[in-house]
Each structure stands twice: as C-alpha cells, then as structure tokens.
Image: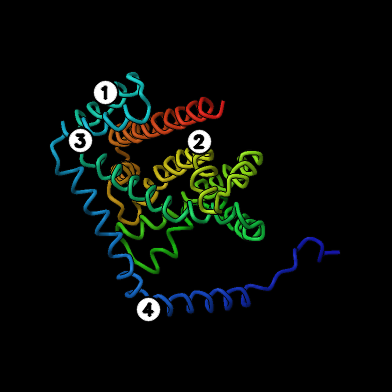
Amino acid sequence: MPWLNEFPSLGSETLSAMRRSIDGSFRNFTREYGEPLERLFDPLRDFLLFSERLLTQSPWPAVVGVIALIAWLASRSWKIVVGTVVTLLLIGFFGMWDDTMKTISMIFVCTLVALVVGLPIGIAMSRWDRLQKLISPTLDVMQTMPSFVYLIPVVMLLGIGRVPGLIAVVIYAIPPVIRFTNLGIRLVNKDLLEAADAFGASTWQKMSKVQLPLALPTIMAGVNQTIMLSLAMVVIASMIGVQGLGQPVLRAISNQYFTLGVLNGLAIVGIAIIFDRVSQAYGKRLQRHLEVVHG
C-alpha cells in the first residue's frame, strides 16, 4: 500500500495559498498600524536611551562604585563585591566598557518591564484558577518557542532598532517572573492566611503584608531566571540592531574573528555571573530573614 509511505497533507499549493494569505494580512496590519504602535513605545525607547547614556557617559569609577554598592546591599558579601569590581575592571581593561554598559542598561530595562508586566499577571493567576489554566499553556508555548522566532513579528511590526529588540527580549524572558510569582503566592502557608482573616485583614492587606512578603524569595528566583534569559536573548537580538556585547559576537561569527568573539563572550559570562550571584544572594537573605521572623 504506497499511501502508507506518504503522510496525508493539505498539498503544497494549499499550504502556499494559506501562508500567502496569513503573511499578506499581517503585512497589511503592519502597514496600517505600524506607525501608531511605534509611537506607543516611544516612552520605553526614551527610558532605554536615558539609562544607556547614564551608564556610558558617567565616569567609570562612579559606575563601578555604584554597581559595587548595589552588590553589597543585595548580598552583604565582600567576595561577591570584589568579584564584581574585578570583573568590571577586566572588561574595561580589554576595551569592552561601552558595549557592556549598553548591555547592562538593556538588561535593566528589560527586567524592569518584565516585572511591571509579569508580577500583576502572576498575582492574578494565583487568585483565579481559571486564569491560571488559560495562561499556563501560553507560557509553555513562550518558553519552548525558538528564540529567533520572536524576532520575526517584532521586526515586521516595528522594524529594526532598540525597541523591537527590547520587546522581543521581554516576551522571551517574562515567563519565569509570572510562573514564580504565581507559585510563591500559592505556597504561602494557609494557616497564616487564616490568621490574617481572623484579624480582619482585607484582601489587599493579605496580599501586600502576608502573601507577597512571604513569596519574595520564590519571586526572586523568577527574577534571577528572567535576568539570565534576558542576557541570552540580548545577544540574539543584536541581529536586529540591539547594541551591546552581542554585536561584536555577531561580527566575530560573520568574519571569523576568534579573539573578538571569545573576549566578548567572556564579558557576557562575567556579567551573567554578577547578576546571578547578586540576585541569588539577595534571595537567600530574604529567605533567612523570613525564617527568623516566622520562627
């Protein structure tokens, strides 16, 4: 039976017609609404440019000092602070300071946007099971979709530049914040919620004074994952004009510049380790503090 050797399909002509129809509709949509959408994201672009100029145009000792101070306040570990300072000095010594600051500014803005959007969604999911059942499959698709695919619709809508790259990074990196916020709130001890009810706490008071504080260590784990995914996606987003350490890596791949690729790759690794160690240390400090407070 020869038909068993060929899987039944719609046929090449039908598939081509379907693809042309969908692509044509999307192109018509971008032509009609592309410009208004670009204007909608102007505040986000201005904020990104401001943070980028702040890091690249400020004196490097001040930038290193502020980052070291943030690392100390978050971790209270001199080892992490010394490692942060040494990493930044080595990056600057090898001529990658400006690109690194652009990458850090992009990660900062992407993480901030992911928190602003993701935290409310995670909180809503923790309160309504139906919403969780609706959003969870969407998050599954977002986390399994190849990262390059995110660039296609964003570029078609907004073109090439920082903002399209930022949006692609946020979409790729936001699922952990949503998932861990939902998980952290759901793991809060029910006895504590019953005690809050007994004291007459409102829904907002329970959320702001009981559930969110107790869920913070879990939420911080989600923030850590979002930062790591943002850093990975920023390198890929360099293909559509995102400035930073990703562009030298892309140039090294195109021109077979081994040393350029390795040095910038090591700079990315160094930044990733700094973000990872500082955020993990802060999460552990929060966990210890809550264990002391709640016995």
Is 99 or 57 nearer to us in this picture?
57
Query: Who comes first in sequence, dot 4 or dot 3?
Result: 4
x 38%, y 64%: residue: 155
The amino acid on which the numbered mark 1 sits, given as a three-letter code, is: Val
Q: Residue 86, labelled with which disc?
A: 1
Badge 2 element: helix
Q: Earlier in the sequence, mark 2 or mark 1?
A: 1
3 or 1: tag closer to the N-terminus: 3
Label 4 vs label 3: CA separation?
Answer: 42 Å
Q: Amino acid at mark 3?
A: Val
Nearer to us of marks 2 and 4 is: 2
Do residues under tags 2 and 1 come within 8 Å of each other at their CB atoms?
Answer: no
In the rendered image, residue 255, in percent from the top left (x then y), is placed at 30, 44
Mark 2 and mark 4: Cα distance apart in space: 45 Å
- Mark 3, residue position: 63
The three-letter amino acid code for the residue at tag 2 is Pro
